Structures are given as C-alpha cells and as structure tokens.
C-alpha cells in the first residue's frame, strides 16, 4: 500500500469543512490511520511537505474571497516533488477549470465527504485518478458522515440540514448543495452531542441554511420536528449544557419567525439573540434576488423577537444589483429604525460569487450618508461586519 500524508490548510474560515472531511476519513478504518497534519498557513504547509516522506497530499478548501491569495501561495510551493494538490469548497466547485489552471491537480465539486475518501482509497491502491474534476454521482446521506472528527478532537457545530430550496441569486448554497432539503436524523445528532458532552463540550451549535427548516421537506415549518430535535438534545445534555439555535452558523428566515417558534427556542435554548436573514428593506430588491419573503415579513419577525425578549442580529447586504436611490433610502431608514430599537446589524457588501445567477453582476455604490450611519452604529457596538473592507476590495 502506498505511503501518504494528508496536509490540510486549517483556519477559522474553513475549519467546519475540514472537520467534516476528517470525520469522513474516520468512518473508514482503512483510512483512519493515515497521518494527518493541520496547518494554519502555507508556510506551515511548505514545512510539512519538506519534512515528510512518501506522497504528500495537500488539501485546501476555500471560498471566492480567498481565491487570489490561495492561487498565489500554491504557485510558490507547486515545485515540490511527490506532492499532489487538492482543492474543494465554494470557489473551486464553481470554477474548477480556473482552479486547475492556477496550479491544483484535482478539484472536488460540491460536497466532498464521499468523493474525497474514494479518492484517497484510490491513491492508496497505487493508482492515479484520470479525472481532474471530481463530481459526486449522488447526494450523500448526512447520517453516513459526522460533522467532526473524534479521533483528531476537532469539534464544532453539528450540521443538521444541507441544501436550500430558495436559490437566492447571490448565494452559492442551493447551487452547491442542491435545492432539496436533507436532514440529519435526531439519533445521529444525539450520537454527536453525546461524544462532545463526554469531553465536557456542552455548548451545542448547528450548521444549517435555515434553523427552522429542520425536518421539513418543503418551505413550511415542521414544528413537531423542531421541538423533537431541541427537546432530545436538551435531554441528552447535563444541566449546565447549552443549546444555541438560530445563531451563526445557522440563521433563521424572517417569515419562519412566529410566537410559537420563539417559544420553542426560549424553552429549550440558551441564546437570546437570533440571526435573521433580512438582506434588504426593499421589496423590489428582495423579489429580484429571489428571497421568497417580503419586507413586511422582516418587520413582523423583528416585532415578535423584541416582544419575546430576543435581540435580532439582522443580516443586510448593501450594494445589491439594481439598487437605486429609492432602495438605498429604504435601507437607510430601516437601519435607523434598527438602531433605535437596539437591534444589531450584521453588514455585508454584495460580492458576485461564481456559480450563482448574479456571478456577473456588479455591486451598487453606497452613498456617503449610509456609510456614515453604519460607522456610527459600529462605534456604538450595534453593527459589525465587513461591508467597508469588502467595498474597498471590490474597487481595487
């Protein structure tokens, strides 16, 4: 059997993806003993390549935001012999040919738990895969693969749902994972909760495109499924255990928020903040980007949150394509209202992402008065995000 080492780029931007791949390796006993090295940067990766003998497989998962930086670094270390470079994640999955051209040897499209482990088994057998772009033949069952690695003690949020039926024109999720909802079973979730709790990790968070979509096969809420999930996890945890639901990395859509749904969260969960995907205060813009909800839904959600004692963390994307002065004014008025109500704004600036319908669109410019208001809110501690950094980056 061929001698190999796996070297992963592992940082705060891709750790959840790498955790899942490490977990997938541990599912197959023939792969679980492969030496794995986690490197925070390319300097560490380069050092590991020099230190290790045999075949070195460098694995890099990344988004479009980091693509230019990643490509530059790969070119610097590409000259190392007996090394194979693998790419996965949102950007390589949307731009596989570009990723190969920039120096990677293989690109994994969409989800990688099965294709990645199949690839490693193929390499171990002494064979060389012919296809440079590796496409899954079918969607995985989430129960077949854990969200993290017990062997490597790399824990994190548990992915409970994959896929999104809304297909917003600016977002890669539906185009990367599909529009059909796939849910992890409660028994499988509890198995992972138990594994964490045994190690004293009693804060439980979830990865999901929409927390209140759990158990549903459509756009409606299955309240019984959500309660069964939360009740079961609560029962599995010790008294000091805490459940975070509807917080990053699993926000809630505004039209899903109701007194009933918040009563459930309040009953079983620790958090009193909720991440709400609003995106815009303009119905015209919400419709054009395919959000599937209205500004009225956003207003209702915020009203219910505040009434029930929750602080809304409101996601807003500024500079969305098609914004005109009227839409910008609506956003400005909305931001001012959020400020008065002590809501928190999570700010974003539109970035055209490959693989989405709006990949070729350009962001709208932000007026000075909106920028000034956002800066004031940041200084007051009721706004945060990368809108300013991203707007400068896209201009350069």
Image: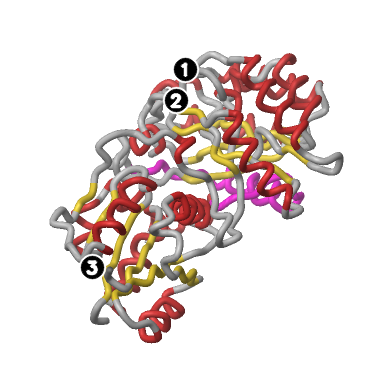
Q: Determine if residue 391 is in view.
A: no
At which x and y percent is residue 319?
Answer: 45, 40
**121, above or below 241, in the image:** below
Marks 1 & 2, CB-CB < 8 Å contact = yes
Secondary structure under badge 1?
Answer: loop
The residue wearing badge 2 is: 181
Alpha-carbon neighbours of circle 2 within 10 Å: few (<14), some, or many (≥20)?
A: many
Asked whether 3 falls inside the magenta stretch, the response is no
The residue wearing badge 1 is: 217
Is 223 in front, or is 75?
A: 223
Q: Determine if residue 286 is in view.
A: yes
Badge nearest the viewer, 3 or 2:
2
Residue at position x 29%, y 75% in the image: 55
The residue wearing badge 3 is: 103
Residue at position x 42%, y 23% in the image: 165
Marks 3 & 2, CB-CB < 8 Å contact = no
Circle nearer the N terminus (3, 1) = 3
Circle nearer the N terminus (3, 2) = 3
Q: Specify whether 330 is left or right of 9.
A: right
**Range drawn in magenta:** 362-386
Q: Quadrant of the C terminus?
A: bottom left
Q: Specify whether 338 is left or right of 221.
A: right
Residue at position x 58%, y 55% in the image: 150
At which x and y percent is residue 218?
Answer: 46, 16
């Amino acid at each position: 059997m061929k001698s190999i080492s796996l070297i992963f780029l592992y940082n705060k931007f891709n750790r959840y993806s790498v955790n899942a791949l490490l977990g997938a390796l541990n599912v197959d006993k023939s792969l679980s003993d492969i030496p794995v090295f986690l490197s925070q940067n390319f300097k560490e990766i380069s050092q590991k390549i020099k230190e290790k003998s045999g075949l070195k497989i460098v694995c890099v998962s990344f988004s479009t935001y980091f693509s230019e930086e990643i490509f530059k670094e790969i070119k610097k270390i590409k000259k190392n012999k007996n090394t194979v470079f693998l790419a996965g994640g949102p950007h390589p999955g949307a731009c596989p040919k570009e990723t190969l051209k920039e120096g990677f040897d293989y690109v994994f499209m969409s989800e990688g738990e099965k294709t990645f482990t199949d690839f490693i088994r193929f390499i171990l057998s002494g064979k060389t895969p012919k296809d440079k772009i590796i496409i899954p033949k079918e969607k995985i069952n989430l129960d077949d693969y854990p969200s993290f690695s017990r062997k490597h003690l790399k824990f994190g949020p548990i992915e409970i749902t994959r896929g999104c039926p809304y297909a917003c024109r600016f977002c890669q999720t539906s185009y990367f994972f599909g529009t059909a909802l796939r849910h992890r079973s409660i028994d499988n979730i509890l198995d992972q909760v138990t594994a964490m709790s045994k190690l004293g990790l009693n804060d439980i968070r979830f990865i999901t495109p929409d927390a209140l979509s759990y158990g549903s096969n459509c756009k409606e809420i299955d309240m019984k499924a959500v309660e069964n999930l939360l009740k079961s996890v609560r029962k599995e945890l010790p008294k000091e255990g805490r459940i975070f639901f509807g917080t990053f990395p699993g926000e809630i859509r505004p039209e899903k928020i109701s007194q009933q749904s918040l009563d459930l969260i309040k009953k079983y969960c620790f958090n009193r903040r909720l991440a709400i995907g609003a995106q815009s205060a303009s119905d015209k813009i919400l419709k054009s980007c395919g959000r599937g909800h209205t500004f009225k839904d956003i207003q209702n959600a915020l009203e219910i949150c505040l009434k029930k004692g929750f602080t809304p963390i409101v996601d807003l994307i500024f500079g969305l394509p098609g914004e005109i002065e009227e839409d910008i004014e609506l956003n400005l008025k909305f931001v001012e209202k959020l400020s008065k109500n002590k809501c928190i704004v999570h700010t974003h600036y539109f970035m055209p992402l490959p693989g989405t319908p709006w990949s070729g669109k350009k962001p709208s410019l932000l007026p000075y008065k909106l920028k000034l208001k956002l800066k004031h809110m940041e200084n007051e501690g009721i706004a945060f995000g990368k809108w300013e950094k991203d707007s400068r980056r896209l201009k350069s």
